[in-house]
Image (cartoon, coloured by chain):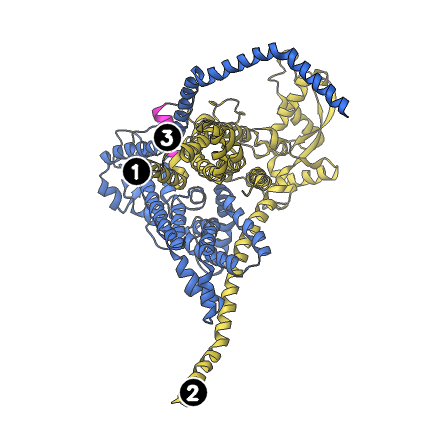
Chain colours: A blue, B yellow
Amino acid sequence: MKVYRKLAKSFYRKEKCIHTDEQAFVSAGLGGYVAVRNGIVKGSRKQLEGVIKCLLAACAFVAVLTTVGIVLSVVFEALRFFHKVPVQDFLLGLKWSPQTAIRVDQVGSSGAFGAIPVFAGTLLIALIAMLVSVPLGLMSAIFLSEYASRKVRTVVKPLLEILAGIPTVVYGFFAALTVAPLLRGLGRSLGLDIASESALVAGLVMGVMIIPFISSISDDVINAVPQSLRDGSYGLGATRSETICKVVLPAALPGIVSGILLAVSRAVGETMIVVMAAGLSANLTANPLEAVTTVTVQIVTLLVGDQEFDSAKTLAAFALGLLLFIVTLILNIVALQIVKKYREQYD
Amino acid sequence: MNENSIDNLCSVTDTVRNGLARRYRAEKRFRWFGVCAIFLSLLFLVILFGDILSKGLPAFSQTRIKLSIFFDPDLLPADNLESADYNALVKSSCRKLFSEVKDRRSKRSLYKLVSEGAAYELRKKVLQNHNLIGTTRDFWLIADDELDMLMKGKILRDSTGRYNQQQLGWIEKLEHDGRLRRQFNFTFFSSGDSRDPELAGILGALSGTILTLALTLLLSFPIGIGAAIYLEEFLKKGRFSDFLEVNINNLAAVPSIIFGLLGLGVFINFFGLPRSAPLVGGLVLALMTLPTIIISSRAAIKAVPPSIREAALGLGASPVQVVFHHVLPLAMPGMLTGTIIGMARALGETAPLLMVGMVAFIVDIPKSFSAAATVLPVQIYLWADSPERAFSERTSAAIIVLLIFLILMNASAVFLRRKFERRW
């Protein structure tokens, strides 16, 4: 044993001896390397890191640029539109028929740009969508978070989320080719005359699309209500449904309201379902069985296939876009504000 | 006094007891509402999928007619094979099959059973193999879309349908001779759009989608991650960071059609980029998915515990090194998950692409970023507008393909999350 150790030691010493020269060389090199790293190169590294930081900041700035781009592109064209059509005519007019003269010398078809029927149609469809999605989404969320077992929850929740992942063009196709004929047949057997492109169909399908949106937000909010509130209510002898209706929901109300506002903003901005299932004719009506048109439908029909950007017709689309942007922005900001205030209460 | 209070108590418990049945009923009813809500939502999901599958699955097969084609050397001059009259070959073969058909109108209605695409198929075969000329061969050629619909039972076999009695007789004879059969629809996957439903395919839309999404990914992934890193790691909390955060949150909720207006106003009108091109579509979708990627990447970076940063800093790493050597690799799975979900959204997006003109009728398969192209959802929108029944079938089939892609992407996101999810 000892012999071995001795041998090893001597061998080690020998190795050391052999390598001293090289080691000196290496250590000198290393020292130089370290010196370089700490000295000259460190300066360049700092520069490099500065450049990297600038690049990262530029990335973050793209988001700001996008907002600026949206505002500029929409505002400029909208201003040009308002030069041709006065703002009050646009906002308060009751007739929407954006046909302008095809030839310059043509008479009598200057087009009417009163956007009230368009807004009314948008609101009607959004209202129907909300009437479908709020009860269904809210009740689903309540059931999943308060009644359902863990097993049911893990199965049903992702299934509901699938509804949110389906592209809107698929909903539009389904609405136009399956739901619309179905409702029309149903209406005929009941003696009702349902237009083939009715507000009801578009609103109904849009409502289904929004169900998972409402249910997932409500679910989060309901789960955030502290258990102690429920326990207190049970302790006073309330049943589960009484606890939910009188304790949990009021506590969760701000969050749910903000979720509904976000959902409204989505319903207002939704395009494909209404393009495919709602009509083009701007009827000023509250009857959900008739065809109505929406802001997004008008933007699409005014701009698709049109290449010239001087006519009031195409510019009107940007004015509608500006309005849509402002409305959704306000809804989003209000909703986020409500959520922020609400969070401070329980955390 | 004492008795009185006991009486009171009794009456309270009585009222409670009397009310109990009603309250339990209300409880049951409430629970039942919840079950109904979930059931209705899921029922809709089932109906939607059932409807699209039942409509779309038949489109994956296609009716073909067996015709013996005589490659007549007179009709196929060797110096002009490219533009010879291949239709005439199909016609003469049809005439041979039903030699009793003499007058012109009947002949024309006979030719209508075969698709115009049959001539292209023959042309391809001849150009590949010149030895065919002068021989007679049997080929299964594409049938007309109406005949296809008839074979699939979507059009009734009586004179109320598109076909008259004479044509129905021919079809019966063809069936009897075993000259009609359904086989896998390769055309659907190998060709671009067409006015004829039986020749229309999704390859053009698919390659347009791939080009557009490639550009979207190339732009939004690095920019999104860069922005997230900057916001989480380098930017001091303050008014500016609040402003950026509000900005990004709002962008995430802006309707997609507004991004289309941005693309039209800025990229096409101001910068003069080509309309209908994947270039503009990709740019617009990149801006649209950016907020999603930034938000999820920030969440992933936030989830990396500060102890790791502190350890790296303690060992002498610079802040940039800390981020790129330690934080980024650990946050990468979360970032990738967010990116995949963002890309899945971009894949299904239609409205902004309508705005930048990607709705043209395009037969050619796009090969570059500046070529006119369309994408799968827009193709669905275009076909959904077509009156032919066969197009409605193809629309559903295209939706099935789109949904398969979406399911694959979402499944891979879920897989990534499961596999790399870490609790610190």
Q: Position of residue B10 (x, y in %)?
A: 45, 84
The answer to the question of whether label 1 and label 2 lie on touching residues, with beta carbons closer than 8 A, is: no
Q: CA distance from mark 3 to mark 1?
A: 27 Å
SS class, disc 1? helix
SS class, disc 2? helix
Q: Main secondary structure of the magenta part?
A: helix
- Judged by depth in the image, the label closer to the viewer, 3 or 1, is 3
* Amino acid type, residue under disc 3 in the picture: Phe
The local crowd at label 1, few if under 14, some if 14 to 19, many if 20 or more residues have their Cα within 10 Å, is many
Q: Position of residue A236 (x, y in %)?
A: 45, 71
Depth order, front residue of A44/A213: A44
Is A43 left, or right, of B131 in this rendering? Answer: left
Mark 3 = which residue?
A: A61
Q: Which chain is mark 1 on?
A: A
Mark 2 = which residue?
A: B7
* Amino acid type, residue under disc 2 in the picture: Asp
Depth order, front residue of B78/A297: A297
Q: Position of residue A142 (x, y in %)?
A: 48, 59
Depth order, front residue of A202/B33: B33
**Where residue A10 is drawn, which disc sits there?**
none
The answer to the question of whether label 3 and label 1 lie on touching residues, with beta carbons closer than 8 A, is: no
- Judged by depth in the image, the label closer to the viewer, 1 or 2, is 2
**Where residue A319 is drawn, which disc sits there?**
1
Let me know if residue B348 appears in the view.
no
Query: Is residue B291 shown above or below A191?
Result: above
Residues indicated by labels 3 and 1 sit on the same polypeptide chain: yes
Let me know if residue B191 appears in the view.
yes
The magenta span reads B260-272
Q: What residue do we see at 42% from left, 90% from top?
A: B3
Is B410 left, or right, of B99 in this rendering? Answer: left
Is A2 left, or right, of B405 in this rendering? Answer: right
Q: Position of residue A298 (x, y in %)?
A: 36, 40
